[in-house]
Image: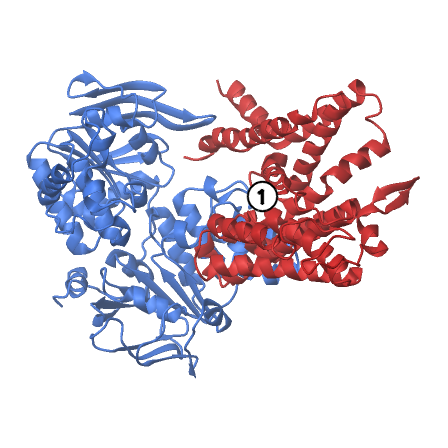
Chain colours: A blue, B red
Amino acid sequence: MLALHGLYKAFGANQVLRGVDLTIDAGEVVVLMGANGAGKSTLVKVLSGYHVADDGVMTLAGNAYHPVDARDAIRQGIVTVHQAIDDGVIPDLSVADNLLLDRFASRDHGLWVSARTLRREARQVAEAMGMTLDLDARVAELSVADRQLIGIARALAHSPRLLILDEPTSSLSAAEAERLFNLLDRLREQGVAILYISHRMTDIRRLADRIVCLRDGRVSGMFDQKPLDLPGAVQAMLGQTLEATAIQPVAPGPAVLELHDIVLAPGSKPVSFAVGDGEVVALTGLLGSGMEALVAMLFGQRPLSQGSLRLDGRDYAPNTVSEALARGVFLAAKDRSVNGVVADFDIADNMTLPFLKAFSTGGLLRRSRQRQAATQMIERLGIVCQSPQDAIGTLSGGNQQKVMIGRWLQAPCRLLILDEPFQGVDIGARHDIGRQIRATAKGRATLVCVSEIDEAIEIADRIIVLHEGCIAGEQYNQDIDLGVLAAQAAGHG
Amino acid sequence: MAEPGAFRARLLAFAIRYGFLLLLVGLVLYFSLAAPGFANPRSAVFVLQSVAITGILALGVTTTLVVGGFDLSIGAVATSSLMLAAYSMVVLEQPAYVAVALCLLMGALVGLINGLLIVKCRIPDLLATLGMMFLLIGLQRIPTQGNSIATGMTLADGETAQGSFSAAFLWLGRHRFDLVIERLVPVPVVIFLLIALAIWLFLGFTRHGRLMYAIGSNARATALVGAPVARYKIAAYMISGVTAAIGGVLLAARLGRGDIASGNNLLLDSVAAALIGFAVLGAARPNAFGTAMGALFVGILLQGMTMLNAPYYTQDFVKGAVLVIALMFTFYLSSRRGPSMRH
């Protein structure tokens, strides 16, 4: 269906694509893997008409393919669902408007918008996708997962020949992801070629016909023998083998955080557990498991409805973020671009933001001390950058995430909460972060919230599975049966 | 291949960083050669004096821009302050220090209300301060039935106002300090430089300033590191209100009467200075040094043109042109620099 040969693309002095060769057949799902900065996003942008390649040949169904812009790419049958969900939807418009948005942008569409035709066509699109949303609802009122599905549904409404999906499941629950996979299976049978970008092993196992690895702007590996060689693919993507990460669970010290009869969802059974000194506990569960509520309660953003919390044996009921910080509870929040990164700042300022008081004398900030602290953390976490004065926007996603984690490792704390610390992070950076968390775990309790069970196993001494606000399973991280944990998370435990 | 590309990138970076300051130096050189009498201390002080009041207001609006807001009410606060100073001295017959204190208090109060409307009632900045602007423009006319205030004016009850602007108050607007030459530097210029220095230090070099920039860039992330975001926002509007009130006091002291029509241009001129400041040193964000330079740039340009006999009615056009060019410097050039740095 699509063939690329010798594709080159540079931005200024920065050569991003260095001769990419790739073919995708009709009815085939190709998973594209690559570390942050390998050139995945650039490749996708060239295919979807946002960038023009400097050199190379592209053919689509045997004809030369040279999209002049994004609309032209869609017209020729290459449709892309981008990773950033909110780039794809207009929050102030209704679901129906959003589903048909690109038809309004087409010159073939007349001047007037008829409400009846709009609803009829939108319903067709929604039904094809198996969506049960209220078409008149405003998108701003929907969950992230629903917004993601709208973006995907709109892409499918173009009957694409090649569908490109960039980490489409990053904000979907398992049930919603399964619905998407079923849909992709149907498309595959209809002969649509699919280019699927993901770091998630569960997605890759479920979908891939073939894995293509990208490294430093070149294809560094191709795997099409069943069963697919996932460790081999990871190695091709990183250019090195990762040391085994089998974890020796640490015997926990005295309890630092204790939960007594906390109710995470209205009407669900109260939850009690404790996290000890030096222990890393992973909480895992799907959307709606109550993890979000628990993090908000622990960090003073949501009042306790019932039960009590204790920190170091003393009552703990924070009402504000600063009360939580004063007791030594730190949170590295999820969705770093919304909740963490200050885009206008450099690395040093981003990293030291919570502790500016400690970096100033008499009200005046000491830049040199900020830089010094940032430089140390850059070394510890292996952040790839020129200097601590680099703007945070110049870093790749994985390195930005390292800055966000490093921010909360600057000072000792009693409880460190990491909410989805591996979101949008490649496997290499994931290992760096995990190693640093475990290396510093002594002297505090660590709570890591992840929706991927694979990630929990990589980092935790103990894993607690939540399902609809209740504890569905709890296990020390040794000889773990993935299937059992997955079943517990899905509520069949 | 890479060489010319890298050279162009460096040239672009240089243009973004120093372009505006070079333009300023070039302008000064040109006027010094073309307009006899431009390059002397009296002329320099005259430029400073002409920009002092708009500069002070612009520094306040810079503070609100830093936290991601915008204060449209500064012009109205300044004229209200001017009217209040005149009213308290001429009609209420109060001494100078009471008049000044009342004005500063009024500025702080307006800033507080602006901040509360924005933070607590969640009214967008532009709309809240636009509403406040209308409110103040109306309010300042009510006590005097829409008339200007001067000694000897007739009051509502038919009596004549007996009070007058005290000498101490007029000193604020008219006194000149000796500096090498006798009676050279006017008080407003000194106050402008002091406020500029204070706000430059506060925004650029204190942790409070750093947190305010963080709020402007990502308020949610800043709240999650424990910063009192609402309080900082309110503080920014209070700073803006107080600086605008100071501007009004200085204007009143210079004019020596409560002129209802003065200060018409204050809002647009000071906003322009703050926005021109984005372009200075390639900051691409509000900053006190840039704002002061922006105000100076406009002042020098107007002074030089006046000395070259350009008619006064071309002034607004020139200011507009400078603003548009500065915005191009900031946004177009830095957007060209942007993509090459990302992957």
For residue B235, say whether it is visible.
no
Q: Secondary structure at mark 1?
A: loop
Viewer-closest of B274 and A472 = B274
Residue at 25 percent of width and 46 percent of height: A231
In-image side of A253 versus B137 (left or right): left
Q: What's the chain of the residue with tag 1?
A: B
Viewer-closest of A29 and A268 = A268
Residue A77 vs B213, above or below: the answer is above
Residue type for callout 1: Pro
Residue pointed to by mark 1: B286
Residue at 30 percent of width and 19 percent of height: A56
Viewer-closest of B294 and A433 = B294
Q: Which image quadrant for residue B121?
A: bottom left
* Crowd tier of the residue under label 1, counting other residues whose Cα lies within 10 Å: few below 14, some 14–19, many 20 or above: many
Quick one: quadrant of the C terminus of chain A? bottom left
Percent position (x, y) of residue A101?
Answer: 23, 36
Residue at 29 percent of width and 57 percent of height: A455
Check the image and name the residue furthest to the front.
B158
Quick one: quadrant of the N terminus of chain A? top left
Percent position (x, y) of residue A396?
Answer: 41, 42
For residue B13, say whether it is visible.
yes
